[in-house]
Structures are given as C-alpha cells and as structure tokens.
Image (cartoon, rainbow, N blue to C red):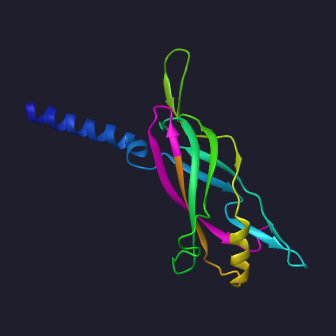
Amino acid sequence: MVMGWRLFAAFLISLVLAACSDVFFHQPYRVLLEPSQLGYEVDDQGKITIVGNNAYVQVAPGAPGGYLERYEYVVVDDSGNEVFAGSSLGSGFVAVEVPEGREVSQDGQVRYLSKKSDPFRFSLDGRVAAEHLNQGAPLNWRVQVTWFVRTFNDNEISWTQEYQIKYPLQ
C-alpha cells in the first residue's frame, strides 16, 4: 500500500512540474513584430525608406511582470558571420511595461494567461539597410536581438531572438 501512495505522489509531482514547465523551463517572453521581418524599400532615386515595425512583448502564462528595458543586436550574414564585427552599432533602450501573465479575480481565484505589452516601435537600422543593399540584398541576413526584461521583483531576464532582413518589405 505504501508503494502505491509513493507511486501516486511521484505521478502527482510530475504532473505539477509539467504544468509549470512553460514558465520555469521555457522562455517566458517573446518580442513579436508586425510585419514579422525587418526591412526597407528603395525608390527610383535610390533613397532607402525603412519600413516601421510595431513590436510587442508576448508574455507566457504565469510569467512575472516588469519592464522591457533594453536590447542589443548583431547583424549576421547567410554564413552566420557578424556583418559589423566589433561595432557598437546595435543597442537601445525601450522602457515598455510587460504585464504579468496572470490575473487575480475579486474572489481570489488566480488565472494564468498569455498577455502582451502595449506596442512599441522597433525597426531596422538605416546603416544596416544601406550595407544590405550594397551587398546585393542577400536573402539570409538576420538581426540577432538580445532583449532584457527587468521584472518587478528586480530580476533581469534576457533572451535572444532572430529576425530576417527583407528587401523589399511592403
């Protein structure tokens, strides 16, 4: 009988851990772009116009709230090599509030749900667009962005996402 309870307890613990795995074992945030790629247009006179992206932080159920403080990025070519190696080109500050991935009702019930931040602007850098065009607009250039969230309990969480550069992007 004791062996049966231990087996049941082990099963119950594994279920609880599986339910929490999205928050504790996976990335709790992602920055999504609209449009989903970074890009630019070029007119008949050769003037580059950067296509603006709306971005927002997608929050996993149960993730802590905080602020998306900053980002750093590198541009890589189709071989994975940095295009502007050693350059301090890619960084910036955002200061966007990231909502908590849960809600507490008036009766004290906690609901874990996915949320997203208010939109903010994040677009391709003009220097990157010019170099991409000068190199013949290769198909597989990407921007690798490391995002930094400072949670409300003062922990810093960082993760890296990759966005493709596209010309023309309409």
Residue located 71% across and 70% down the image: 127
Residue at the far top: name it.
107
Image quarter for residue 167? bottom right
Outermost left residue: 2
Q: Quadrant of the N terminus?
A: top left
Q: Residue at x 70, y 80 (%)?
A: 137
The outermost residue toward the right is 44
Residue 56 appears in the rendering: yes
Give how far across and how far down residue 143 sits, in percent.
Answer: 60, 66
State the image coordinates of residue 152 (x, y, percent, origin top left). Answer: 50, 32
Residue 60 visible? The answer is no
Which residue lies at the image location 21% right of the left edge and 38% below the top edge?
Answer: 10
Residue at the image position 33 percent from the left and 37 percent from the top: 16
Q: Quadrant of the C terminus?
A: bottom right
Where residue 135 sits: x, y (%)? 68, 84
Range of the magenta residues? Answer: 149-170
When the figure is inspected, residue 66 is found, relative to residue 38, above or below; the finding is: above
Residue 27 lies within the magenta run = no
Q: Is residue 167 magenta?
A: yes
> On the picture, is 129 further left or further right than 25?
right
* Magenta-drawn stretch, dominant element (helix, strand or loop): strand
Please provide percent x and percent y for residue 104.
53, 23
**Observer-nearest of 18 and 35:** 35
Which one is nearer the viewer's eye here, 26 or 81? 81
- Give the total number of marks visible in the rendering: 0
Taking the image as shown, residue 154 lies to the left or right of residue 170, namely left
